[in-house]
């Protein structure tokens, strides 16, 4: 892997223990109503489409402008609200840290099986208020904007990036494919855009 490149999940592989990918949602804002179960379903379908298998966990958080501005300042050095932030845990396999209490066996304790542990993928943090403000000049409406931001954030957690022009084109194409398959169930609306108008 070239220096500075993030690991990417390639192909279908089993990650984590037995089970299915799970998405945990927290709506920690009150400005814009969101449908946590619906958006968790979209994120879960994207994980599956991207080859995540087994017991893997992703967190999806909806926060207010103050909270996302704090995170943006803390992690990206930008003191303003943004629409979405992704915090991947750069792991593609489960690792077990040996802890004395976990390594003991006895009549009531079996050894830890790494295959029983979930893979923690990371967090996607969205600000619905920012999404609402930019929706008309971006994805077209709030529903499509939230869907785009969720797909975008999940792809970042899985190692996709858009720092270089070629990466940006591939990521936008994959976002559109995933939205057409798992959000619209068909072609994108005519007014859908992935880049904001300036």
Image (tube, rainbow, N blue to C red):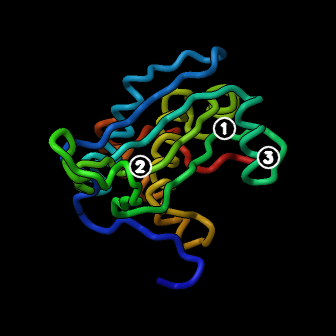
Q: For the residues carrying marks 3 and 2, which lies nearer the camera in this image?
A: 2
Residue 149 located left or right of residue 21 = right
Residue 120 bears which disc, if any? 2
Which residue is nearer to you in this view: 25 or 164? 25
Which residue is nearer to you in this view: 73 or 49? 73
Q: Position of residue 102 (x, y in %)?
A: 33, 50
Q: For the residues carrying marks 3 and 1, which lies nearer the camera in this image?
A: 3
Mark 3 and mark 1: span between their CA atoms? Answer: 25 Å
Q: Which residue is mark 3?
A: 73
Mark 3 and 2 residues: CB-CB less than 8 Å, in contact? no
Is any part of residue 136 visible from this angle? Answer: no
Is any part of residue 21 visible from this angle? Answer: yes
Q: Residue at x 59, y 71 (%)?
A: 165
First of labels 2, 1 by sequence position: 2
Q: Position of residue 136 (x, y in %)?
A: 63, 32
What element does badge 3 sit on? helix
Mark 2 and 1 residues: CB-CB less than 8 Å, in contact? no
Q: Position of residue 160 (x, y in %)?
A: 48, 62
Q: Judge whether 28 appears above or below 47 on screen.
A: above
What element does badge 1 sit on? helix
Q: Which residue is mark 1?
A: 137
């Amino acid at each position: 892997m070239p220096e500075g490149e993030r690991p990417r999940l390639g192909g279908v592989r089993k990650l984590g223990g037995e089970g299915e990918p799970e998405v945990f949602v927290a709506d920690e804002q009150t400005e814009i109503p969101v449908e946590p179960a619906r958006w968790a379903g979209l994120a879960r379908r994207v994980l599956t489409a991207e080859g995540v298998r087994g017991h893997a966990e992703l967190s999806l958080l909806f926060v207010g402008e103050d909270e996302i501005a704090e995170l943006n300042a803390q992690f990206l050095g930008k003191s303003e609200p943004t629409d979405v932030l992704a915090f991947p845990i750069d792991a593609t396999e489960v690792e077990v840290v040996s802890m004395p209490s976990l390594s003991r066996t006895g009549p009531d304790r079996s050894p830890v099986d790494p295959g029983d542990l979930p893979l923690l993928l990371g967090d996607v943090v969205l600000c619905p208020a920012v999404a609402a403000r930019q929706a008309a000049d971006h994805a077209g409406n709030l529903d499509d904007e939230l869907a785009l931001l969720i797909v975008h954030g999940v792809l970042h957690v899985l190692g996709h990036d858009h720092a270089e022009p070629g990466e940006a084109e591939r990521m936008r194409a994959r976002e559109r494919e995933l939205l057409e398959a798992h959000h619209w169930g068909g072609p994108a609306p005519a007014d859908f855009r992935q880049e904001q108008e300036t």
